[in-house]
Image: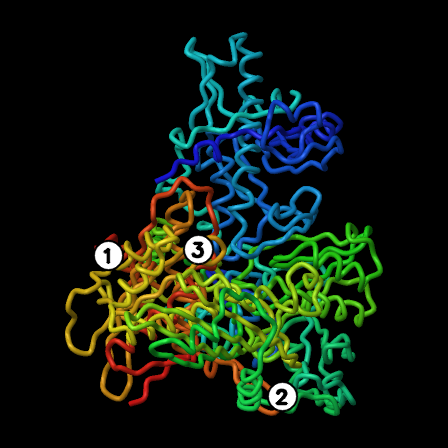
Amino acid sequence: MLTLRINGTEHQLDLDPAMPLLWAIREHVGLTGTKYGCGMAQCGACTVFLNGAPVRSCSTPVSVAAGGEVVTIEGLVQGLGASALGKVGQAVRTAWLELDVVQCGFCQSGQILAATALLAENPDPTDAQIDAAMSGNLCRCATYTRIRAAIRRAADALV
Amino acid sequence: MTTTHDQIATIAPDTIENTGRRTFLEAGIAAGAGLLLGLRIGPAPAADTDDHAGTAPAAAAPFAPNAFVRIGTDDTVTVIVKHLEMGQGTFTGLPTLVAEELDAAWDQIRAEGAPADATRYNNLLWGSAQGTGGSTALANSFEQLRKAGAAARRMLVTAAAQRWQVPATEIQVKDGVVSHRAGHRAPFGELAEAAAKLTVPTEVRLKDPAQFKLIGKPGLHRTDGPSKTDGSALFTQDVHLPGLLTALVVHPPRFGARVKRIHDTEARAIPGVERIAGIPSGVAIIARDFWTARRAQDALRVDWDETDAMTEGTAEILARYRELAKSPGAIARQDGDVDAALAGAAQVIEAEYSVPFLAHAAMEPMNCVIEPTDQGIRVWNGEQFQTGDQAALAKVFELAPEQVEIRMLFAGGSFGRRANPASDYLIEAAHCYQALRARLPVKLQWTREDDMRAGWYRPLYLHRIRAGIDPKGRPVGWDQRIVGQSIIAGTAFEPMMIKNGVDQTSVEGAANLPYSIAHFRLDLHSPRLPVPVQWWRSVGSSHTAFAGECMIDELATAAGQDPVAYRLRLLKNHPRHLAVLKLAAEKAGWGQPLPKGRGRGVAVHESFGTTVAQVAEVTVRKGGQFRVDRVVIAVDCGLAVNPDVIHAQMEGGMGFGLSAALLGEIRIEHGAVIQSNFHDYQVLRIDRMPEVEVHIVPSAQPPTGVGEPATPVIAPAVANALFAVTGQRLRSLPLRLSP
């Protein structure tokens, strides 16, 4: 038995400790906004926060996350409005909606979490810093120009 | 500019039926229920046709109804969208058409995927088949969905007129509210029940485009934006059903190999593994969840019978294609006498172009859920080709096609992959379900490695072009030969799309080369290989634009002329090409000096009725490293229904093409694919995405698609820009400069 704290809720789960956190979140907790894209930390679709830092949940054993604080896209958008991270997340999501960033949408949970992590650490990133921070998150629809613009917009909104 | 007011506003005679009426009356009035509107679109009865000249041929036969609009008593307007939303914007573009004629407010619009039912939801450009592809979604729905909206509006107006006892002509509809100057006012929801009891009008009048309030206007946000930014959008990967099991499949490492022996003692011992069995495409592992199946996959050992396995690799295939390119193929187009023209030319330029196999590599690896129902089966899928998949699954399960119910979910990208001509992964999911031998739902989930290695690919193609110019540099002859697998051969599309031995998808974009050249020949070899291939965003144009637009650039150089000016002179009969080329060149500052190490390249290409020009600006550094800094795009896609969606498709479609131009390559060695995941099949990341500018040519012509046409233009534009800087002609993709 291990305890996973996800978006503020505790879950007691009987899982293989080597199971990636991704599958625990998706198939055992039932939060499916976090996606499987590559299984080897190459695409970023599985990005979640673990103890305030973005991690690739496809390559993080669930045992590593046990006892820690996990935040997924659902938690970022719905439940954390008042927290510092939640505030940044809301601004990012608002910018995403205003600029109609999404296309197929599959990678966008990970993009929004990565963008939130960037702005939480660096409230006024340059384009080069945006590119560096976001280059681990693939988007096959190539929504990249709007991702850049939305991050700048969210940064402006947070000033 | 020509106005096509008539084309847009002319009303075809329709029979419109209220398909919801009977159910509605029988079921009583449920909360949220209201008007469900169906349309019969098609030829009018013979007696009617004289009044409506120019419509489809007369036929009295009834046509099955289509249902597209549902208005709830809660004021929501649900538009039933018959085309897959895979990013390209169908869930926004198609509802725009309905909302416009209905005079709905954009924020009351909801989009819902249509069920599989080709009698109502066929693609009007595909005859009787239902499916999404060829950038047809908006084009084929343009009139159909506006009529659906207009009919619903008429019924709401009639219901209001009856309630208020005023003439219908005095009633106004605006932003989802019906009103009359005497002070009457009702939002749609209040009138929905009354409207549902009315006879559906047999004719509707569509708006004059000058009256459009939503079509062509900015500010309409995507209907799928909210759910795709809060984790709630439902993709196939996210489907969960009671008792659902996960299936993974071990595929043969080499194309053509078959299962000989399965060593599964260890894998079967893993708790939660329900079944391991050979299926036609490999070995199915069915387990309680993904991770359990994955562990079983690692523990499983399979001996393969490689008697019939492919032995060739990319190098051998290319060598074979080069040999083949020496002999004539099946003629796709022939004008004049090209041999004589080349013999008499002042200069003949000969070049070979090649493009590799490519994976679609959608972010969501292929997957499909099969669920047993009392009637047959239910399929949950990012469904792109309902009619083909329904037929294929019906055959596997020995059911009638209508017993195969399909829930069309969002697709996490597709780029053509989910419309597989052989329904490959859906049939594999069906085989997994059958192998389980239990009435439990099964989700087939491909790993990224399966997605890379189990097919299906954009074929490798080789082009050989010889072109001659006269003393003034004008092209006098063009002789092009294409070698590459046919996508269509062996599929149900063969009778329609292979003509005189020529697969139209292999030559599109080359057979219709727009430049004025009196003597022209294009021929084709379609060798067969065990590598499974299919359409990849922009299909034939993904290679023909590269070869054609690089070669015309080479001719401009040989003629000592500017690449834009050279093209303009040869495009006199192609006003749309001329317009986009001029616009892109002007906006890009074509001809203005750039610092050393930087240069511009241009390309223009028409695909799927849409014409796109792109100017790429590149910086080349020492050692052959280069970066695409900026891309200026001009597009003519007819009437721009959703300008922002068009911008997004131009940006993203170009980016998808740029990924292939810079990085994309599936290599085969000894019958096996080398690449396995995103570490060795690199795709474009944000740090290599250029700045992009999009300009739409104003047009009143009927709209054409935008999902694909930006993709094929960027590779030649970048190759031509690299030539402008370095003098190197790069003739194969991905583009690699010599240091």
Q: Kindly state the secondary structure of the residue where label 1 is placed.
A: helix
Of label 2 and label 1, which has the lower sequence position? 1
Query: Circle 2: is it few (<14), some (14-19), or many (20+) Cα within 10 Å?
Result: many
Q: Residue at x 72, y 25 (%)?
A: B25
Give the Cα distance between marks 3 and 2.
41 Å
Contact check, label 2 and label 1, Cβ < 8 Å? no
Is residue B620 shown above or below B419? below
Q: Is residue A132 above or below residue B61?
A: below
Picture quadrant of residue A54: bottom left
Q: Label 3 is found on which chain of the structure?
A: B
Per the rendering, the mark at residue B671 is 2
The residue that mark 3 highlights is B229
Using the image as rendered, state which of residue B541 and residue B390 is in the foreground: B541
Tag on residue B300? none
B220 vs B163, left or right, is left
Chain for numbered disc 2: B
Q: Chain of mark 1?
A: B
At label 3, which amino acid type do we have? Thr
Residue plotted at (67% across, 75% down): B248
Q: Which residue is mark 1?
A: B587
Q: Nearer the viewer, residue B382 or A48?
A: B382
Residue plotted at (51% across, 36% down): B98
Q: Could one spot residue B92 in this view of the protein?
A: yes
Give the residue type at disc 2. Gly
Residue type (three-letter) at the residue carrying disc 1: Lys
Of labels 3 and 2, earlier in sequence is 3
Q: Nearer the viewer, residue B585 or A23?
A: B585
Quadrant of the rendered image containing residue A102: bottom left
Q: Is residue B528 above or below residue B139?
A: below
User: Crowding at label 1, few (<14), some or many (≥20) Cα neighbours within 10 Å?
Assistant: some
